[in-house]
């Protein structure tokens, strides 16, 4: 990670941590780097979510890009995976998504995407940071070389067409609930499911700039659980603010996590001959129950660090076809270069319809170990993580758990937070061990009061 950019872009509170000046500088550098520095005019694609500040950052990025001679193509409110997809298929030099994903409305972020639709490489990101810090000087464009903006809503429409064409089945008479988190999927998700014939029921699709992710979406799925049960729906899908993740609710109101998705779709892909290398890619946060279920059906797995970036890198390096995180980032490399909540929902619908089973039946073989995850805000993530007393407490917990559970302590890639997770035989045991480590972090003065 760099000085400004974490594992998922430059993220922070709008106009405090991430300012409009930063956005202008990012636009200035990218417009020059992909344009004048290579003796051409750059084409850069921009999308945004529904946060109030996303409009400010969109215009600031456009200002910087045009001042450096680039043309800025604006997709308006759209999803992160749609920007990645259109950047790749329409031959843009790079893409920019303005979103802080599942964070509250007052946060925002700038995610950079390369010409292949993948997260930007570290080398380029470090150059952007050097420009922000004044270590690089670049010229402004003049006269006819100054850039322009281009309305590119057609890109979003083409992405919708791509999603519709992906489905192998009609969704006729299937009652589907969608929670759009008052975010980027609000204009897209219903259009796709309606076009495929579903009886679509939508909640949290009235964004006002301030309500994105507020008590809704994949991070507050309890609303969709109630909605599915109360309306007798067959299935429900909850997206986050930029729709790169999806969690599912079965017909009984139970949550189907990203781990369940890896099992359900991985097994189906194995059965139809599409599971390359007979492996799925997981992260260290995946539950023991997933691995036990995969073992029973003879599917192998790999484990990466937390972050869909690392999952994708492993998939590309080894030729795997499905991978993801428990939180709902699932990547199908046949279709996308990044996690895509809408693709995930369509692939789960495919399995359900192809097998003629309810979602609860498909998910049943994955029996989770109890898991408790708590976050603690700290002054310095490395200092807290590397404190000898904290490490000793973690080692002691791991020793006491033995083969009956595990502990994982890691730094958040996007927030000043240490995450402490324990899996064990009961919630009480998990709580006890998580609290023991957090108490040490607090006692050593690392916690933010």
Image (cartoon, helix red, strand yellow):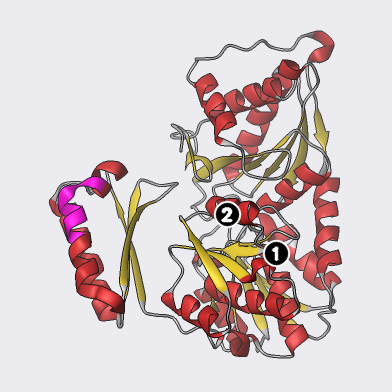
Give the answer, above or below, for where 275 lies relative to 130. below
Tell which tag, 1 or 2, sits nearer the viewer.
Answer: 2
Residue at x-position 62% and y-position 51%: 317
Task: Point out the tag, 1 or 2, that comes first from the N-terminus.
Answer: 2
Residue at x-position 36% and y-position 74%: 371
Question: Which residue matches tag 1?
Answer: 342
Q: Position of residue 15 (x, y in %)?
A: 48, 33
Name the mark on residue 314: 2
Residue at x-position 71% and y-position 16%: 37
In the image, taking residue 309 as reference, residue 206 lies left or right, namely right
Residue 425 located within the stretch drawn in magenta: no
The quarter of the picture where residue 433 lies is bottom left
In the image, taking residue 12 as reference, residue 128 lies left or right, namely right
* Residue 270 seen in the current view: yes
Q: Nearer the viewer, residue 16 or 325?
A: 325
Give the answer, above or below, for where 92 lies relative to 345. above
Q: Nearer the viewer, residue 222 or 130?
A: 130
* Residue 216 seen in the current view: no
Give the main secondary structure of the magenta stretch: helix
Q: Residues within 10 Å of mark 2 (few under 14, many from 20)?
A: some
Q: Position of residue 17 (x, y in %)?
A: 44, 35
Q: Residues within 10 Å of mark 1 (few under 14, many from 20)?
A: many
Find the magenta span and give its range. Answer: 386-393
Give the answer, above or below, for where 60 lies relative to 434. above
Q: Position of residue 375 (x, y in %)?
A: 33, 58
Residue 389 located within the stretch drawn in magenta: yes
The quarter of the picture where residue 65 lies is top right
Give the answer, above or below, for where 344 lies relative to 86. below
In the image, taking residue 150 as reference, residue 404 lies left or right, namely left
Name the mark on residue 179: none
């Amino acid at each position: 990670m760099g000085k400004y950019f974490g594992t998922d872009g430059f993220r922070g509170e709008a106009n405090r941590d991430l300012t409009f000046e930063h956005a202008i500088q990012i636009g200035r550098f990218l417009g020059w780097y992909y344009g004048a520095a290579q003796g051409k005019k750059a084409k850069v694609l921009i999308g945004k979510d529904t946060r109030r500040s996303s409009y400010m950052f969109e215009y600031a990025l456009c200002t910087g890009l045009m001042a450096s001679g680039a043309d800025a193509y604006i997709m308006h409110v759209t999803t992160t995976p749609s920007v990645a997809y259109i950047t790749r298929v329409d031959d843009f030099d790079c893409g920019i998504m303005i979103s802080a994903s599942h964070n509250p409305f007052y946060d925002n972020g700038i995610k950079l995407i390369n010409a292949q639709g993948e997260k930007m490489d570290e080398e380029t990101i470090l150059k952007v940071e050097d420009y922000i810090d004044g270590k690089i000087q670049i010229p402004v464009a003049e006269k006819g070389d100054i850039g322009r903006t281009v309305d590119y809503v057609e890109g979003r429409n083409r992405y919708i067409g791509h999603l519709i064409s992906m489905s192998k089945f009609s969704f006729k008479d299937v009652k589907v609930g969608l929670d759009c988190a008052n975010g980027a999927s609000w204009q897209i998700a219903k259009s796709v499911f309606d076009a495929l014939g579903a009886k679509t029921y939508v909640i949290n699709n009235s964004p006002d700039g301030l309500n994105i992710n507020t008590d809704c979406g994949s991070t507050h799925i309890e609303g969709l659980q109630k909605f599915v049960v109360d309306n007798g729906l067959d299935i429900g899908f909850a997206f986050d603010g930029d729709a790169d993740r999806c969690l599912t609710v079965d017909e009984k109101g139970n949550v189907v996590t990203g781990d369940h998705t890896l099992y359900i779709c991985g097994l189906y892909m194995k059965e139809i001959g599409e599971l390359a290398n007979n492996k799925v890619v997981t992260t260290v946060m995946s539950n023991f129950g997933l691995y036990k279920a995969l073992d029973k059906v003879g599917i192998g797995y790999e484990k990466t660090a937390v972050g869909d970036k690392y999952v994708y890198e492993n998939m590309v390096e080894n030729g795997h076809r499905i991978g993801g995180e428990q939180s709902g980032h699932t990547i199908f490399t046949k279709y996308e270069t990044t996690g895509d909540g809408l693709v995930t929902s369509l692939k789960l619908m495919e399995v359900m319809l192809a097998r003629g089973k309810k979602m609860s039946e498909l998910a049943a073989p994955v029996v989770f170990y109890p898991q408790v995850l708590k976050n603690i805000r700290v002054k310095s993530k490395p200092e807290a993580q590397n404190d000898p007393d904290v490490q000793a407490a973690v080692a002691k917990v791991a020793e006491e758990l033995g083969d009956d559970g595990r502990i994982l302590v890691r730094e958040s890639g996007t927030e000043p937070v240490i995450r402490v997770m324990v899996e064990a035989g009961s919630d009480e045991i998990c709580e006890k061990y998580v609290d023991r480590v957090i108490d040490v972090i607090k006692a050593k003065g690392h916690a933010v009061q």
